[in-house]
Image (tube, rainbow, N blue to C red):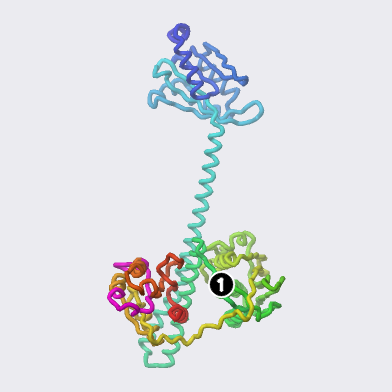
Amino acid sequence: MFFRKKIKGDESLLMSIFNEIIDSYCDFDICFEVGGNHSIIVKDTVEGQVRMARDLPYRDIVLNYASQRVLPEEKESYLKKAELSNIIQKLKENKVYTIYVSEKTPDGRVLKKSLKHTFLEGDERIINVIKTDITEAVAREERANARLAEALQDKEKAMSAQRDFLTRISHEVRTPMNAIIGLADILEEDKNDPVALDKAIKQIKYSGEFLLNIVNDVLDVSRIQQDKFTIRHEKATFADLFEAIDMMIVPMCQQKDITYGYYSDIPADCYVSTDIMRLTQLFINLLSNAVKYTEAGGSINFEARRLSESTEKIACEFKVIDNGIGMSPEFQTHIFEPFKQESRMAGSQVSGTGLGLAIVKGIVDALNGTIDVHSTMGRGTVFTVHLDFDKVAPADVENAAPENFDLTGRRILVVEDNEINREIAATLLQKRNAETFTAENGAVAVDMFQASDEGFYDTVLMDIRMPVLGGFEAAEMIRSLDRSDAKTVRIIAMTADIIDVTEDSPFNEALTKPVNPKLLYSAISK
């Protein structure tokens, strides 16, 4: 009786219902008394008109809605949630109770709906239900969740690949490290045996170079991922490339009893502008990979063909062909990703970090070329690389820098916190007649430079990561000193980090540790 009287006598109730419709932009609004025998349904029709129905029992409304609109598989759950006693209990606990259902429209579409229950204006005798279409909101949320799930899956794959990489690289590093430690023990026992001493020194050097290659691979991949992989153009001939490849690959093939074939119709004396070191690295990586996965008695061929040539450019195609174990079609789609190694190879006798082909792709991209792979399991693999080169005239080729560097008269300040590295750098320079001075950190280096006469130091070799004061900060402090040689002294960074030497950099050049002696002498001689 209360509900019916309130409807007839108080227009504020109707206004509240209409306001709910306007504010919520709902499908319909049901208002019923807690007893459940009297209700008002206000509905927004297809034509956009509002119509009203009164005095329908709440239970009948719920059953009718469930049978006509709710999906069959959700009907039982909806009826249980829509029980009046359950709704009252939920509202007393939380003030708002929402039921989510799926509706099937006459044309077969499935829509998502939310039925929001509240006490009307806080009056616990009257319950208001607003049904709203949330189909698009649910679809947006599902799309966002799908993207999130995909991103999480990609992240997990990347983390798994990196875990596999760390496992492999730890094995790769331990092998030469164990050799170095073992050889050091042998040297202690056989230090008076010249033959054993000479053999151990060569083996230590080989193991150290192997370790250096691993570190360089990691650095190269890091540069590629940070878009800091740069190409240094220089003048070179294809003969330089082919000779470097032969020097590395022929012994590897001979050791494994693999037949190596080479063909080229590119003029060996053709001068081009390119990064000969990176170009050589590209094909050494491809060919050494072929050696790894080709059994004894197999064959590897390196082909270089001239596709077109003008007075200014030459377009070339290079192929690395082997009849090794091949690759699965699935792995070929991921072959140039860092840390990737096919599962059937990961547990085999073949070693490797899984970085070589990622570096190959980085070099090819940096040279504005293309690379394709075709492989059949059990039959072999073909890598095809297309590269264009700018030609240069032989008369423009600069004379190669002499390798017998003489640093007589040069005064060089070596700044390095590691005592062993400091001694090695000083010894290498002294062998070329340089006069060396050392500092254990950047602060000491700045004090030494400031206390010296102007022009005393020709070069400063600066480590980057040091206690007290780092190399970058020390170099900037030297450049800021109020003296004529502060701007002109050569400051060369020595670091395992990735450094771009720009116009704003305090460094003239950057060398990667461990420093190659020839590169060190060349940098100082400039």
Question: Which quadrant, please, contains the N terminus?
Answer: top left
Could you tell me the amino acid type at mark 1? His
Tell me residue 336's x, y (percent): 58, 63
- Please name the residue shown 27% across and 75% down the image: 451
Q: Is residue 4 above or below residue 149?
A: above
Instruction: State which quadrant residue 103 falls in.
Output: top right
Tell me residue 347's x, y (percent): 53, 67
Tell me residue 339's x, y (percent): 52, 63
Instruction: State which quadrant residue 475 falls in.
Output: bottom left
Magenta span: 448-472
Q: Is residue 142 above or below residue 294?
A: above
Q: Which residue is mark 1?
A: 233
- Please name the residue shown 64% across and 69% down the image: 387
Q: From the viewer's side, name the closer residue of 157 and 36.
A: 157
Tag count: 1
Q: Mark 1: which secondary structure? A: loop
> Is 239 part of what is drawn in magenta?
no
- Please name the residue shown 51% across and 83% down the image: 401
Q: Is residue 482 left or right of residue 335?
A: left
